[in-house]
Image (cartoon, helix red, strand yellow):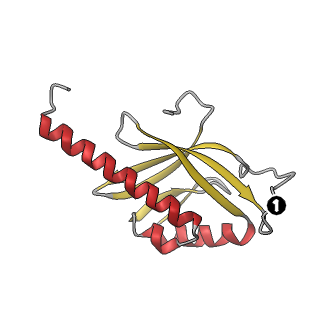
Amino acid sequence: MGRNSTPSTSIKRREAINNNIEILKHIYDRFNARDIDGVLVALADDITWANGMDGGYVHGHEAVREYWTRQWSMINPHVEPVQFNTAADGSIVVEVQQSIRDLEGKPLQNQTHGLQDKMVGHVFHFQDGKIVRFDIQDTSSEGFAG
């Protein structure tokens, strides 16, 4: 236990982490079910969300909704969490198996973007029980916490 920690502080932190992991399990389930509203309820109004298709970020609920609506009109992504880890900064890093199919369910071929079947790291930053930032991390990089 750190010098500035008390048993009750450590217990509260562990409870918050466990709660955040349960929130993440729920949003992966809702994402795969194409339930945008079921995911948005866990996001802060001013969320910063990584755009895995085009690069950069989208900001806010409506931008996330538009991003996913556009994405799902072109491809059929499925993300399956494999492992949850807590980073030193308190963020939660989720090792995810990402599967990308076309709208007919066939694997994508000859694509130049990063949307392909692979393991990726999803990094979630929480504040007051809501996700405030989402980043995508290459699992082959040294910085991956998995």
Residue 86 found in image quarter:
top left
Label 1 sits on residue: 106
Give the left or right position of residue 124, taking residue 98 as reference: left
Q: Secondary structure at mark 1?
A: loop
Give the left or right position of residue 94, taking residue 139 as reference: left
Give the number of callouts. Answer: 1
**Placement of 115 over or under 89, stated as above or below:** below
Residue 38, x across and y down, in percent: 46, 71
Check disc 1: other Cα within 10 Å, few if <14, some if 14-19, many if 20+: few
**Placement of 129 over or under 82, stated as above or below:** below
The residue sitting at 27% across, 49% down in the picture is: 16
Residue 13 found in image quarter:
top left
Residue 44, x across and y down, in percent: 38, 64
Q: Quadrant of the N terminus?
A: top left
The residue sitting at 39% across, 43% down in the picture is: 91
The residue sitting at 81% across, 50% down in the picture is: 112
Give the left or right position of residue 40, taking residue 101 as reference: left
The residue sitting at 80% across, 68% down in the picture is: 104
Q: Nearer the viewer, residue 76 or 45?
A: 76
Looking at the picture, which amino acid does disc 1 mark?
Lys
Residue 31, x across and y down, in percent: 55, 64
Visible in this render: residue 62? no
Q: Nearer the viewer, residue 99 or 90?
A: 99
Residue 48, x across and y down, in percent: 47, 58
Give the left or right position of residue 59, taking residue 54 as reference: left
Visible in this render: residue 144? yes
